[in-house]
Image: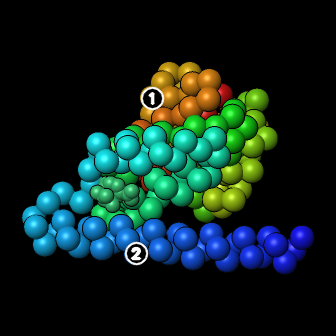
Amino acid sequence: MRARVLENTRKLVLLMNERMALARQIAAIKNANGMQIRDPEREAAVRRALISENPLINLIFEATIVEQTGSPLMDRPVEISGNRDDLFLVLGLFLCRPGIEIHGSKIPDSFVSGCSISGGHTVPSSGACEDTVDIGSGFPVKMEENRMTIFPDLIRVKNRCNSIRVIF
Ligand SMILES: C=C(O[C@@H]1C=C(C(=O)O)C=C[C@H]1O)C(=O)O
């Protein structure tokens, strides 16, 4: 079983490197022709082909696209599909960074995991925070039944604040 999981991991790495190399070649052709690197219609077509219920795959796809423009900043909303636990895991990964404190009550376990993977930590309290993200408000993160949309403003909050209250 371990040999198989290792082999699977090697294939994933090869495929991901191949995908990124292809996308960089396309980006170089676009650059040479004075075209925009990002193409929202094409991205939508790729997302339709992806049809993945695995939010980590969706996240990797979004991350590889952002990587091509050479910008660490998200310039448009990112949509992630998956079940509630997976979405909260990804939200924790996105919203947190080393040293950040997330305050809140009824924090989902999967969010706690995502937050700690990103180097942050959660505080089950209502102490003073620098900003608030209300999950129910629809902005800067919109939670639906099996889908979540993260708007670039969420990343701005994350970069600006060391403590954030999240209303789950
Ligand atoms: C690779 C391309 O460029 C960008 C990257 C994409 C991708 O990684 O799938 C899709 C569309 C573009 O935003 C392309 O236009 O095909």
- Decide: is 160 above or below 41: below
Residue drawn at (57%, 24%) of the image = 144
Q: Considering only vertical position in the picture, is 62 above or below 154? A: below
Question: What residue is shown at x 50% (from left), y 29% (from top)?
Answer: 142
Residue depicted at 82% across the width and 72% down the height: 4
Position above or below: 27 against 131: below
Q: Earlier in the sequence, mark 2 or mark 1?
A: 2
Q: Quadrant of ligand 1?
A: bottom left
Q: Would residue 131 appear left or right of 1 to someone viewing this image?
A: left
Quickly name the residue at label 2. 21
Give coordinates of residue 130: x percent, y percent. Answer: 51, 41
Horizontally, residue 75 falls left or right of residue 54, namely left
Badge number at residue 139: 1
| Amino acid type, mark 2 | Ala
Q: What residue is rendered at 73% in x and 30% in y?
A: 105
User: Is 32 left or right of 142, judged from the image as shown?
Assistant: left
In-front residue for pair 168/69: 69
Mark 1 is surrounded, within 10 Å at the Cα level, by few (under 14), some (14 to 19) or many (20 or more) other residues, namely some
Quarter of the rendering occupied by the C terminus: top right
Real-space Cα separation, disc 2 to disc 1, in angstroms: 34 Å
Q: Secondary structure at mark 1?
A: loop
Front residue of 98 and 151: 151
In which quadrant of the rendered view does residue 1 lie?
bottom right
The amino acid beneath tag 1 is: Phe
Q: Nearer the viewer, residue 163 or 93?
A: 93
* Mark sitting on residue 98: none
Q: Is residue 102 visible?
A: no
- In the displayed orientation, state which residue is furthest to the left: 34
Q: Mark 2 against mark 1, which lies toward the viewer?
A: 2
